[in-house]
Image (cartoon, grey):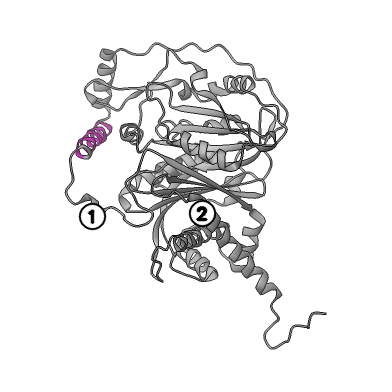
Amino acid sequence: MQRLSPLDAMFLQQDSPTVPRQVASLAILEAGGRLDYDRLIHVINERIDLVPRYRQIPRSVPGALGTPVWVDDESFDISLHVRRSALPRPGTVDALHELVGRLIARRLDLDRPLWELYLIEGLENGRVALLFKSHQALVDGSETVDLAQVLLEETAHERDIPFEEWNPRPAPNGAELLVETVSRNVRRPAEALRITEHNLGRLARKLPVVGSDAQAPHGVLSTELSRHRRFASLAVSLDDLRRIREYHGGTVNDVILACIAGGIRGWMLTRAEPVTAKTSFRAMVPMSVVAKDGLPTSLGSKVRGHLLSLPVGESNPVVRLHQVSYALKDHRETGSAVAASKLAGLPGFATSTFHAVGARVADAGAGRGHQIVITNVPGPQEALYLAGEAVAEVYPCIPLSGRRAVAIGVTSYHGQVFFGIVADREAIPDVDVLAQCVEDALAELVESVEDRRTRAPRGRQRPARP
């Protein structure tokens, strides 16, 4: 009998209409594919045995003496979880963004297994997209990985995997749950103490806290969250980021974070928001480490939250990049950082699982006062396939929580870097402008490399152009 961890139980308890606790990934397949709904159902049925929790639901313990337990859903119906949707013609990217924003804002049914997968048809050029949604209590990266990691594979060969008919195991009744929980608490007093602390925390969260708003982050990236979301995406060349890294130093991750800082700056200026030399935002950036602390994963490393002050007030893009690189210098030099090449070389699409764990880390550290969450996970540079169909683009969708109005997920895959930007619909109606400003900030850094490479050495005159 598997139990939810106190962190999982917290995610379940905190799920609300304004803060749906779910992580999502948007995958767009290459044009000309043949994936349809029936084939998708067949592929999931073949592989769902690898992730048993996708057929389970959390069951509460009487008296809240322990965290809920995972039990098989006796009425599991895969058609309630795998759904079809279609865009109106001509199936533009803007229409896809609008639909994704609506779907990620929709809460999962907590009385069913905590995931959904949407097959989105009608994109331009005959393409289809897949939107994976899973609850933060479901994917912990240790016991259960993200469904995208199970479905996406490295071969274009369409495989039929034998699978057996599934029969749910009988769920324990209330008395059995109570007896087992009391026995477990006696055997594991430390765990029982953590559960008591969790329940006391639940009670405290229901009580009004005087002055809490005064300590919460305020500003253009902070708001009282609404029930609605917006989504924007951006795809850029990985080679451009590598050229910037090679010329200016640091890492690709430094370049990405500097582009986001520059993008926020440009976006604020378009809104006539005040920007001074001291303007900065506190970002939570989960990173993979080999260390004793952090949330464990089944892939051999842990994920730990790193706080970074984004230098939004700096107008010079190169100086901005150097400031980010310097701030992350200690992380690189401790020897605990996991190399990007190692993460990119993991089998399957482990990237989606690491984004889910990163979101967990960010929420577990909510008391550290960060104003934005940024997850960046290197992905494979070879093409991946779903049921024999090539995946062209993959965008993470990181959930909003607290008063944070924006979250950004970044994935590198097959020569490109994909940014997924989730924003509160009412607070940030111009999220597409933010995405454009991030792209503009990258263009500034690319231009800085090109300008310096064509600049004549000091003391010499550049030959006149014919």
The image quadrant of residue 382 is top right
Q: For the point 69% across and 88% down, which residue is it?
A: 459
**Secondary structure state at the residue bearing disc 2:** helix
Q: Report the span colored magenta.
A: 190-204
- Apparent side of residue 210 relative to residue 270 in the rendered image (left or right): left
How far from the left and from the top, in percent, is residue 197?
23, 37
- Apparent side of residue 188 relative to residue 263 in the rendered image (left or right): left
Residue 296 seen in the figure: no
How far from the left and from the top, in percent, is residue 250?
56, 63
Q: Main secondary structure of the magenta part?
A: helix
Q: Which mark lies nearer to you, 1 or 2?
A: 2
Q: Earlier in the sequence, mark 1 or mark 2?
A: 1
Residue holding disc 1? 214
Residue 57 seen in the figure: yes
32 vs 245: above or below: above
How far from the left and from the top, in percent, is residue 137?
39, 32
Residue holding disc 2? 433
